[in-house]
Amino acid sequence: MVAAYFRSRTPGDIAFSVVLAALCVLILTAVIYPVYFVVIASVSDPTLVATGQVWAFPRGVNLFGYEQIFKDERIWNGYLNTLLYSGVGTALNLCVTLPAAFALSRREFRPRKAIMLFFAVTMFFQGGLIPTYMLYRDVGLLDNWLVFVLPAAVNVYNLIIARAFFESSVPEELYEAAAIDGISYFGYFLKIAVPLSKAIISVIGLYYLVQHWNDFFTGLVFIRDYDKQPLQIVLRDILLSNQAFAGGAGSAGGAGNYAQQYADQIKYGVIIVSTLPVIVLYPFLQRYFEKGVMIGAVKG
Amino acid sequence: MTVTTHLRRHWQLWAMLAPAIAFVGVFAYIPMYGIQLAFRKFSFQHGLTGGEWVGFKYFIQFFESPLFWTLMRNTVTISLVTLIVGFIAPILLALVVNQVVHSGRKRFMQTATYLPHFISTVVIVGMLQVFLSPSSGLVTTLFGITDVNLLGDTSAFVPVYVISDVWQHCGWNSIIYLAALSRVDPQLYEAARIDGASRFRLIRHVDIPGLIPTMVVLLILSMGGVLSTGFEKVFLMQNTLNLPVSEVISTYVYKIGILSSQFSYSTAIGLFNTLINFIFLMVTNQIAKRVSGTSLW
Amino acid sequence: MASRTRSWCGVVLASALALTACSSGGDGEGGGGNTLRVLVLKHALTGPMKDMAWVAELEKKANVKITWEEVSADWDQKKSAMLAAGDVPDLVVGTNAITNSDLATFGTAFEDLKDDLGKLPNVKALFDAKPELRAMATRTGGEIYTVPGYKRFWPQTVTHQYINKKWLDELGLKTPTTWDELYDVLVAFKEKDANGNGDPDDEIPMDWSPVDTGGFGYFQPSVLLGSLGLPISAGGGQGYFVEDGKVRNFFVDDRYKRVIEFLHKCFAAGLISKDVMTQDYTGYQSVGRGQGDVAKVGFSWGWTASDRFGAQLAGQYRATAPLLAEAGQSTPTTWTYDSYGENFPANQIAMSASTGNKDAALRVINAFYDQDISIQVLFGQFGRNITKAGDKEYKVLPPADGKSDPSSWKWTTTLADNGPTWIRDDIEVTLPTDLQEAVDQSEPLLPSIKNMDLKRDVFPAQFIQMSAEDLTTLSTSNQTMLSITQPKFAQWITKGGVAGEWDAYVRQVNGSGMPANVATLQRYYDKYAAQRS
């Protein structure tokens, strides 16, 4: 539809297109170059990288970094764990957040302001690590994989965004029409609100997924059994074991030349290994942001 | 309306809220008793709630610290500039991306701008070190910058911090706006076309109004972070040269805490931080309600 | 789609609620029997405990079975939650895994070993042989919560000074002995093509390890204070030092001002790396390694030449003696004294106050300080890492993995410096080459260290225990002081201005609570000195 609109071109529109294209090229260069740098740095001689001699093409090419990462068997287990935690975690997040956001978006629901405040307060006031640790210990979440899933079931920030979308994107007339047909809240939520909100569901889902995917602190503090550690912790350990003595050779009594040299290369490799799956996923979600998908579905 | 009629009419909404309320109640509210640590002297023997009550001692200690005003100034500067630039940039990016008609190019543009979000802070700072090095950095050489040390000068710290931050998260943060743009009614475009509006006017009169509810919500939320600067990046970017502008509340708490387990003091500073943030959120929320009719509650 | 979503919710929620309901079942701590839960803080390089042959020997000696909980990263974050929640394993192993400040706050989480020395004959013998270790282990209230160690062989200083001898020879220059001579040499390094690669501009005459916002450390120009006879230890730290029995802080000392002036002169002449204030440790190390056999750095400080400049370039560098501030000066030079920190590692093992098997835990502590176990903990197991040549004679072997260097090899195969260790003074050990190199390269520095009276010129921080209140005050005031001193250090060297700003700066630093800290440290020092004599 939009495309059809632009087929009729005025000189002003053409100028606009030129400026737009230039702007896009500029943005792309600024954004892609550093990403490209990460890729070439992950296969280049780290000494050359650190001294600013690698910038256009990889130099002193070797795959030592990736060898170090993949020769560690723990990485596959870490991948599986992260997939499990992110998958189950995100599913639970959506199941808890979306209905709550919908309920809070209903204007006729009077207590919603008080409940919003109840949620919003937790974005600010937190008990701190020690009482949290004690709570997890008391409910048996220490060293239990559910610690990755349950405590983070609701992210209030995401809840607020989802609520705002339900409020403004689902036309109120639809609810009135449905209400006359005697539809229940459950029915309205599942049959109308959710299908109309694919864009926001995929955004919130992505937010949650990435949050789980990058979660590093939970494993660090609350998990002892290494078999339950997520990918981020495993990669961190691989990185550190090569970083060796950076930060003060003397205090440790001597530096590992051989190891230390490659720490940086692994640092760059780790980024690629850990984020590739999330990056690959994105284009699949993108189609839900395409213009007109939703409104067309309603009004068509 | 009595409680019974309310429940009869709305019990399904309560049921939909119940899981979220339960999770937040258990995992966020139960540990909150830990906040009283800010008013007590932490004592291991007597537990979290058993230490001697000292009232506002730790708050006063913080306010009277010679570093207090420096920390406040640095923190507010960094976070306010990040907040403003970081708020506007994703909106502009979303508007630009949204103008790309060709669907393949548009997706490519989106994916590309979203990538840097996944580079870890350590690596971002490492890359800044390499690119901005006064002797061999690519940026320094490319733009012939010789009189400023971009990594050390106190005047360069905030721009470098903010620009790299925007660069890294702009694409990611624009996703939500793209989602919002996706629900702009095509009939509005149609109507504008009949009026003979230019593309620029289309953005002004159709796209931007469509974004406003989202913008307001995000602005309110980000105002609630006015005293929170990310710890890791500031800490990693810190050096002896830029310390006068790069010491912020979070790095100070870290340094104080790591040297001697000052739980009470750091809890008090954290609580002060939180209060200011919360007040900012409430005020912005009230203003937004008056001005735009959109608000969190 | 919708109904699927709903049933998902049901399943997940049900299990969640079930979990919350049947929660507080208890942790299932093993405790009894002969099994101990031991947390060990390892270096990130170090392999799994089960691969260390001495572990079996230790278990046999102590007659226990150990379940290891191995931590090698982000220990600080884990620790505070664990300690505050009172969740301490039977034993915690690792140098300074539990720090003095942890003990000041969480001391009672640990067993007081003072009354158990009867069951710890090795520890008792260690304390008798090295009384300073007993002082080190004893808290202000008299308790002994942790046992320190003794490594004996580490050189008296960690920071060694190097100059590129090949460049000197190439340019026909002599090794500098004074600041002025150093300045001239550095100018020659800068102006000529010292490394002979055809580019006269790629030499970095002088470079040092990044100075942190938290104070001075190893391989930093704070050692130049020694040229003026100011005795520092551990690289300088937060500026506190003892001179002739009096505690002071060099941040307000005129000699510090002179060092800054000299360094600014060098920086202004382009003799110091432009990146010196802003590079990270990786950058500093990478530059030192040059390119192939072309060196980049002329004069610098490091642990050993091989470590600092890489195996390929190490041969070009010579370890040199401390410089005189001016030719023919009457003040004897000093150097940073680091032996206490290196040879007397603190807080190596601690025992939970609530362990279910106290006797077994004590036996493990004792076994760690056994002669044979100790040396294996430090350098690796017999056979692979060490040959035991006689009752009191050991030889550390070169790495079995040809790709590895002695240092990495040691850290990969054993707990090394992180493990509880008592190296007896009466045994003979052939050291690994890296440690030997460090000892050899300390040689030129020894006369300057001899100029210091170890009793009256070195603050024995390692052996002094302070109260929680004092630790808190010290660290808070130091933070304020460092926020003034560190930026000034960097600014004065790169931009100058020390002469004009010095007096105002001294007033500011004196207003930061530093003088009170000096008084506190003096009090502890006097008490320790009285005890010692």
Image: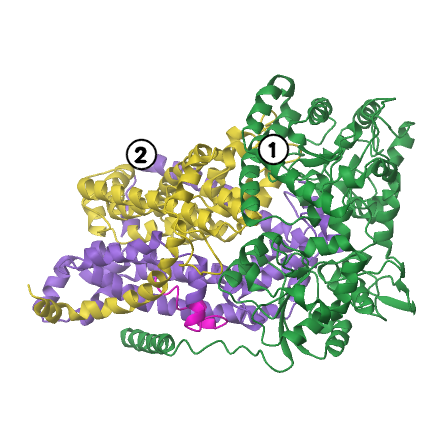
Chain colours: A purple, B yellow, C green
Magenta segment includes A149: yes
Question: Which image quadrant is residue C30 in?
Answer: bottom right
Q: Nearer the viewer, residue A100 or C479?
A: C479
Direction from residue C51 to residue A225 in the image, left or right: left
Tag on residue A12?
A: 2
Label 1: how many Cα within 10 Å (few below 14, some 14–19, many 20+): many
> Which residue shows up at 20% across the image and 42% down it?
B292
Q: Amino acid at mark 1?
A: Gln
Q: Position of residue A224 (x, y in %)?
A: 55, 69
Q: Chain of mark 1?
A: C
Q: Position of residue C475 (x, y in %)?
A: 56, 42
Q: Amino acid at mark 2?
A: Gly
Question: Which image quadrant is residue B74 in?
Answer: top left
Q: Are marks 1 and 2 in contact (CB under 8 Å)?
A: no
Q: Position of residue C234 (x, y in %)?
A: 72, 42
Mark 1–mark 2 Cα distance, whole angstroms, equals 57 Å
The residue labelled by disc 1 is C486
Q: Which residues are magenta?
A: A136-154
> Which residue shows up at 36% across the image and 59% down it?
B33
User: Can residue B80 be seen at all in this image of the molecule?
Assistant: yes
Direction from residue A249 to residue C180 in the image, left or right: right
Q: Nearer the viewer, residue A144 or B45?
A: B45
In the picture as drawn, the residue positioned furthest to the bottom comes out as: C33
Tag 2's secondary structure? helix
Tag 1's secondary structure? helix
Q: Position of residue A16 (x, y in %)?
A: 35, 37
Majority secondary structure in the magenta region: loop
User: Can residue C280 be seen at all in this image of the molecule?
Assistant: no
Q: Is residue A121 above or below residue C17?
A: above
